[in-house]
Amino acid sequence: MDFPRALRARRTSRHLSQLDLALRAGTTQRHLSFIESGRSVPGRTMVVRLAESLELPLRERNELLLAAGYAPAYPESSLDGPELAPVRTAIDNILRGHLPYPALVVDRGGDLIAANEAFDVLTEGAAPELVGPGRNVYRLALHPRGLAPRIANLAEWSRHILARLGHLPDLRDELRACIPELEPSADHLGFAVPLHLRSSYGDLRLMTTVTTFATAVDVTLAELKLEAFLPTDPATQRALATAAAHRDVQGSR
């Protein structure tokens, strides 16, 4: 896609008028109209300002720069590389800090980067090929050999998962085919979709939080997401504490 069409597509998908975007980017509607029609060729600085004004993810900002004929502005480092070593250390510390509650870090595609020890409570009984670093956590969540058979509110939870996969249409279609036609129940918190999961430690009711590295200027770092599973009732809190104590006993043997 050429730059004028790429810019127009991103602007309209965000329901912004040319005037709205021009004001955000510090230019005029006339100039923006000329850019979108191909009558004016923007400089690199203007492309970056437009991308920032559209609040595009870093990957899309690079794509917009490439469409305009410029080199990408944001690096995409390997998570295993030395430049992101402090990030790996931070991830490990953050995951440990969430214990005894499950927490994990995934990349843009939902592939598991790392998880803490409590994550094992969620993956009980799942097929080995669905579990572990590099495996897709969305597939783990909804696959018949993953968590799905243990999720009591599968209809609500599957809708929650599928709604997050707009940027992964192939995976969304694959997982939608795994989900039976179920009617949502009225058993929910009212302010968030819980995960109601059966486990060997009892029924778990969990809500999730998602954290990102907000000041990232590296594509890899910007696309990482840390998801933590927090108890919504005392019974779940006790169950997770019991699971942690059991792990400690097992580890001391």
Image (cartoon, rainbow, N blue to C red):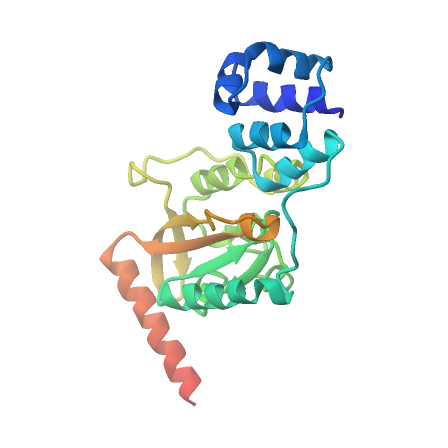
Q: Name the residue: 56% across, 40% down.
A: 179
Q: 197 above or below 189?
A: below
Q: Name the residue: 65% across, 23% down.
A: 7
Q: Name the residue: 30% across, 59% down.
A: 236
x%, y% of residue 56? 56, 34
In which quadrant of the rendered view does residue 4 lie?
Answer: top right
Looking at the image, how many numbered discs can be counted on the residues? 0
Q: Can residue 36 be seen here?
A: yes
Give whichever of 54, 138 is nearer the camera. 54
Give whichever of 31, 121 is nearer the camera. 31
x%, y% of residue 174? 65, 41
Q: 221 above or below 68?
A: below
- Please identify the residue farthest to the left as the structure is shown: 234
- Please identify the residue farthest to the top as the structure is shown: 30
Which quadrant of the rendered structure holds the C terminus?
bottom left
x%, y% of residue 14? 53, 23
210 lies left or right of 180: left
Which quadrant of the rendered structure holds the N terminus?
top right
x%, y% of residue 37? 70, 12
186 lies left or right of 75: left
Q: Name the residue: 38% across, 80% down.
A: 248
Give whichever of 154, 213 is nearer the camera. 213
Q: Can residue 125 be seen here?
A: no
